[in-house]
Structure formats: structure tokens, C-alpha cells
Image (cartoon, grey):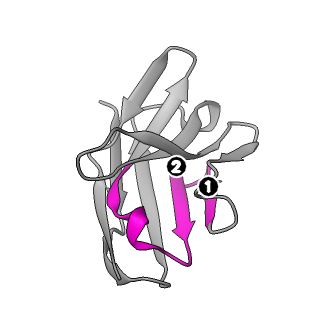
Amino acid sequence: QVQLVESGGGLVQAGGSLRLSCQVSGIIFSIFNMAWYRQPPGKGRDLVARISSDGDIYYSDSAEGRFTISRDNSKNTVDLQMDTLKPEDTAVYYCRAELVSVNYWGQGTLVTVSA
């Protein structure tokens, strides 16, 4: 059974930091690309950052320079360090495992940034 379990969300003031973590089980983690998406209230789900199985990294414009994605293949985890948070970063953050046409989602963790 594939499981992606996010943790680390919460309430933080603008300018603060949070570190999200996604624990993955049930797949060969090292061969999957891993990504973080987010869905603000009342809006669609968008890509925040992706780290490939080879370690190549992509950030959305909104994440570039403030967020850092990393993975630990020995622990089957992917993290998202979020710094200098803004109220517009408020969203449910989802972890996703991607391999060609196969993908798996976590249940999401809520991040709320107060002004």
C-alpha cells in the first residue's frame, strides 16, 4: 500500500519559517520524482517545487529564493523548507510522487500565514 504522509504544517506569522516533511512508503522511493503542490482556499492546486530522482530541482516563481526542496532516499522523505513566508503562501500543501504516468498524493497539510 502506497502512503505519503505530510507533516509540519501550522500557523506562522508573516516572515517566519516552516519545514514540511513527507514520509513515503510502499514504493521504490529513489526512482520517483517528488514534488510539493499547494492549494490556496478556493483556488486550484499548483506546483511549488519538484526534485527529480536524479536530484534536479525546479521551483515555481513564487517559491524561488524562499523555499528549498530536498530529499533523503535513505529515509524515503522529501522536505520543503519555507522561509520568509507571506500570507499568500496560505494553502494546503500536498506531497506527490511521480513516475511517468503514475502518481500518488498525500492527504495534505495546512499552512496558514498570518499578516
Residue 72 bears which disc, if any?
1
Is-magenta flag for residue 71?
Answer: yes
Dot 1, how many residues are within 10 Å of its Cα: few (below 14), some (14-19), or many (20+)? few
Kindly identify the amino acid type of the residue bearing the numbered disc 2. Answer: Asn
Residue 1 vs residue 24: left or right?
left
Residue 76 bears which disc, if any?
2
- Report helix, strand or loop for mark 1: strand
Asked if marks 1 and 2 touch (Cβ < 8 Å), the reply is yes
User: Residue 26: x, y in percent?
Assistant: 39, 34
Where residue 90 sits, quadrant-wise, is bottom left
Q: Residue at x 41, y 64 (%)?
A: 88
Q: Residue at x 44, y 25 (%)?
A: 103
Q: Residue at x 29, y 58 (%)?
A: 109
> Is residue 44 shown above or below 40?
above
- The quadrant in which the N terminus is found is top left
User: Residue 48: x, y in percent?
Assistant: 53, 49
Residue 91 vs residue 65: left or right?
left
User: Residue 94: x, y in percent?
Assistant: 37, 47
